[in-house]
Amino acid sequence: MQRIIIGIALCISSLLFSQNKDKNLYKGTELFGAKNYIEAESDFRISQFTNEEKKGIANYNLGNSIYRQSQPSEAKYKFLNAIENAKSKEEKHKAFHNLGNTLMLEKNYAAAAEAYKNALRNNPNDDETRYNYALAKKKQKENPPKDDKNKDKDKDKDKDKNQDQKNQDKKEDKGDGKDKKDKQDNGQDKDKKDSDKGNEDDKKKEGNDKKDKQDGDKKEDDKGNPKPAGVNKQQIENLLDAVNNAEKKIQDKLNAKKVKASPTTNEKDW
């Protein structure tokens, strides 16, 4: 199981010669070593105001005392004060390192990684800080910020929405294409039907015109050139002969009557 390497060694340098000047800082250090963190906290709180030169050390030790009481959020601010009042790179290094520890407990992995990186800038040879920095980066990658998750989620949602819209547009375009094709087909069918109907009407009209012409020709033939039905040439000659004979008989009768009606004259010769 991966664990954060906690650096909470108290800053006790130069405390021995200044015991008389800052009894609270020295006393707090002894109480902390005895794991009496609550009383150590009280002495460190007093020390941060009584010794301006050791204010950075007092805040660092105060942050460690609060951290040991499982209050990382409050300890975080004391480490920030320690960084602000640090007199050396080593003091900054330790304060940044423990600040990173509090941020890791808050699961603020991005800020923790930044704190460890600043610690390494002040002491690049600290393997514990380097390990914690790598761990923070790993946790950061495994647990992106909530906003990033929401952005990714929204991005995926928008992507799905856009894909659905594209599919819908594609479907509609396909449907429009089909409707257009159906309309074109219907138009072509209608045009074909109209064309077929027109051709049929033209054929019908042509047929009617042809029939009318035939009927007209027939009527003209019947009226202009009458033809006796069922009569041959011999019958015509016989009929003419009969007519001539009848006329001759009539003429003969008329001539006979004329002769009979003429007066008889008997004249004497003188």
Image (tube, helix red, strand yellow):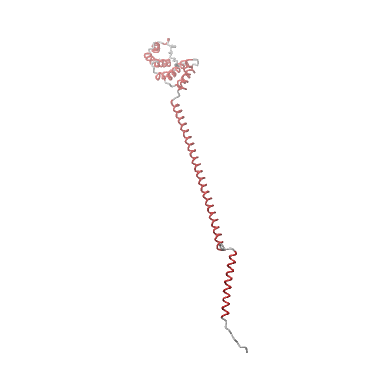
Q: How many marks on residues?
A: 0
Viewport quadrant of the N terminus: top left
Front-most of residues 80 and 209:
209
Q: Position of residue 26 (x, y in %)?
A: 40, 11
Q: Is residue 6 above or below residue 231?
A: above
Q: Quadrant of the C terminus?
A: bottom right
> Residue 42: which quarter of the image?
top left
Tell me if residue 110 comes above or below residue 232 in the rendering.
Answer: above
**Residue 205 in picture, x, y percent from top left:** 53, 54
- Which of 230 and 3 lies nearest the eye of the viewer? 230
Q: Position of residue 6 (x, y in %)?
A: 44, 15
Question: In terms of depth relative to the viewer, which is nearer, 245 or 139?
Answer: 245
Measured as percent of width and height from the top left, residue 198 is found at 52, 50
Q: Residue farthest to the bottom?
A: 270
- What is the residue that sits farthest to the right in this orientation? 270
Q: Is residue 163 above or below residue 181?
A: above
Q: Nearer the viewer, residue 215 or 251?
A: 251
* Quadrant of residue 23 within the rendered picture: top left
Q: Quadrant of residue 249?
A: bottom right
